[in-house]
Amino acid sequence: MSQVETGKTLLEAKALSRHFIVKGDGGFFSKRKSIAAVEGADVALRAGKILAVVGESGSGKSVLARLLSRIVSPTSGELVLNGETVDLKTQRDLAYASQVQLVLQDPFAAMNPVRRVGHSLERPLLIHGVPEDEISARAHEILESVSLTPPQQFLDRYPHELSGGQLQRINIARALAVKPKVLLADEPISMLDVSVRLGILNLLRSLCDDKNLAIMYITHDIASARYIADEVVVMYAGQMVERSNDTSLINSPQHPYTQLLIASVPDPTKLGAEVVKAPSGGAAAFNLNGCRFSPRCSQALAMCATNEPPMVEVAPGQHAKCWLHASDAQRASVTISNKSKNEMESKNV
Amino acid sequence: MKHLQLPKSLKVRVGLAGLGIFILLTIIGPWIAPYDPNYTGFAQNASPSWNHLLGTTIQGQDVLSQLLIGCRSTMVVSFIAGFLATIISIVIGVASGYVGGKADEGLSVLSNVFLAIPGLPLLIVLNSYLPAGQQTNPLVIGSVIALTGWAWGARVLRAQTLSLRDRDFVEAARIIGEKRVRIMFGEIGPNLLPILTSSLLFTILYAVGVYTTLAFLGLTNVSTWNWGTMLYWAQSNNAGLAGEWWWVGPPGIMIALIGTSLALINFGIDEFINPRLRAGGVSAKIRRASGAPRRPRLGLTPVLHKSTEAGSR
Ligand SMILES: Nc1ncnc2c1ncn2[C@@H]1O[C@H](COP(=O)(O)OP(=O)(O)OP(=O)(O)O)[C@@H](O)[C@H]1O
Ligand SMILES: [Mg+2]
């Protein structure tokens, strides 16, 4: 296997969006409305690097992972795999599946309850053209690579006979069976017992280093992102609100949402300090015209409610999508365009 | 299949044994029947004796011979009907649940229509259109019964497929590149097995009832022997009123017994097929003692701690 050089961009998403059409309140006459589950997502996954995507529940992390694995098709945007633009009009094919794999959140649900573990590991090998006589050896090899030994003991088991941590390792093994270059892990530790979480994180880290995998690690737990990630992106209501190409974002958050997110992590050294309530609020709290976070933002400016903020460089390699950090020139351009809009409207009247 | 072992539940064992006996009778019935069921030369209306273990009819025919020979026709028609109806319900139910959308709506309407049509009157109408020669053909009668009996199974299978379709393991199979058809048969299919088997058992039971009823009403060819035609002749000769219990009773008891066997098997079918319930050591008794649900359903893992907690409560 030819090794890709570390840091090379393998999978890139450009302005990827996905809207879901849902019925309003479920009533018979309710209007259909569109939910922007992911909007304008830019991600680059690099060989040998782990990108952490952090965000609260409902921020669109899972949808983003499914978009990248092409299980869900985007409403708009572009995917670039190995420097080539992916034709999103065609069905996802085996070639794509063999390069980009997704590990689902719930290891218990992701395994077929009436099939032996061996089945789940042998199917991907068979589908992706591994000769029949090599299958067994390959299955053993994969299980060993996720530290499940002796392998035969696991192949013959049913999912309900295994622990969550073991199952998640098998889930990861199944994704690795096709030797992908990109691994998307959707909250791989959130359903697991605290005692086995570190093991899974260390496994991801070593897979990333040994096989030069590009990994996207999705989480709502910023502490685990700090532990494992090379780069961090914060999502809010389907948009990326802050990003840094190292973990500096976690130490010096610039976007008010990231600050709130980090403040809500219980800090054992500051016991007794004022507890900041974890940010919450569903789609109802989203502002669709301006900054989506503005209704919950304590520092919001007047313009935040009406104008979408730009992505601004707040420190070397760190960007935040926030008006607070925008230059005067950027703010001024909006004020002017608003003024001219108002003038046009008044003229029309 | 190598991983099917003898079920632990006594009910299922009894049920399987009962069904086994009926299948055996179906095969060897005509050979072990002591007399020709149509022969009318015996003493009439005789109560059971060593020569005629179940007595004779008013025409002087041997009841036991009729019962043994009638078993084959009843069972063959019912099994044909049961399997055909189940195949129809798989095709319609699973397809409708898995494909969804417009196809689902259409197929659902179809099965609802068949569910709403009263089965027996439809059967009587269909049956009366059959050419006379075809009324004794088990395949034809079985198909006609199947046509009226698939809808319930289709609805149940559709609902179950619908709930399985969005499960994570199905998505996981798609992620590794599995094809739709393989997902349907290789991943979803095995999860439908308990419901499928249970639906098959009930459809067979339904077919036994319907076929017997048709024959009892004299709507099939009354010169072929099955339990329904036996009852037809008994009824038209007022055997019940005359107190000839040996004539009326046995066919009724046979029908009740086959029904009981099928129902008993159904009790433990989950345990038989579902690997989670087959799990070594966790018998129904332990499950009950630990307060876990007695009949765990698909998707709910009963977590048992056999060692300490169970006893100390
Ligand atoms: N198939 C769908 N149809 C309609 N809406 C959807 C669908 N899938 C996701 N959504 C919506 O998209 C939004 C983002 O969902 P998503 O599952 O990506 O959140 P998440 O960040 O993964 O949350 P969690 O941390 O709870 O997993 C939610 O508001 C959700 O309701
Ligand atoms: Mg999610």
Image (cartoon, helix red, strand yellow):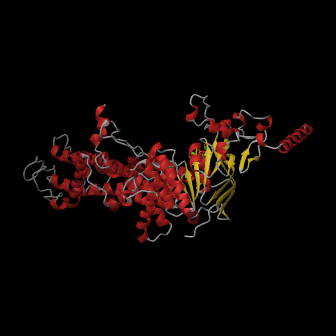
Q: How many marks?
A: 0
**Quarter of image, res B141:** bottom left
Residue drawn at 19 percent across, 60 percent down:
B30
**Quarter of image, res B243:** top left
Whether residue A300 is visible, yes or no, is yes
* Position of residue A198 measured from the top left corner of the image (x, y, whole percent): 49, 48
Left or right placement of residue A82 versus residue B285 in this view:
right
Left or right placement of residue B36 versus residue A149 in this view:
left
Q: Nearer the viewer, residue B306 or B98?
A: B306
Q: Nearer the viewer, residue B210 or A27?
A: A27
Query: If the image is split into quadrants, where does the C terminus of chain B sit?
Result: top left
* Position of residue A278 measured from the top left corner of the image (x, y, whole percent): 61, 34
**Quarter of image, res B300:** top left
Q: Where A148 falls versus A239 (above or below)?
A: below
Q: Where A131 falls versus A306 (above or below)?
A: below
Q: Nearer the viewer, residue B128 or A84?
A: A84
Residue drawn at 32 percent across, 49 percent down:
B279
Residue drawn at 63 percent across, 39 percent down:
A262
* Position of residue B142 measured from the top left corner of the image (x, y, whole percent): 35, 57
* Position of residue A8 measured from the top left corner of the image (x, y, whole percent): 65, 62
Task: Dividing the image into four quarters, tell me where ligand 1 lies.
Answer: top right
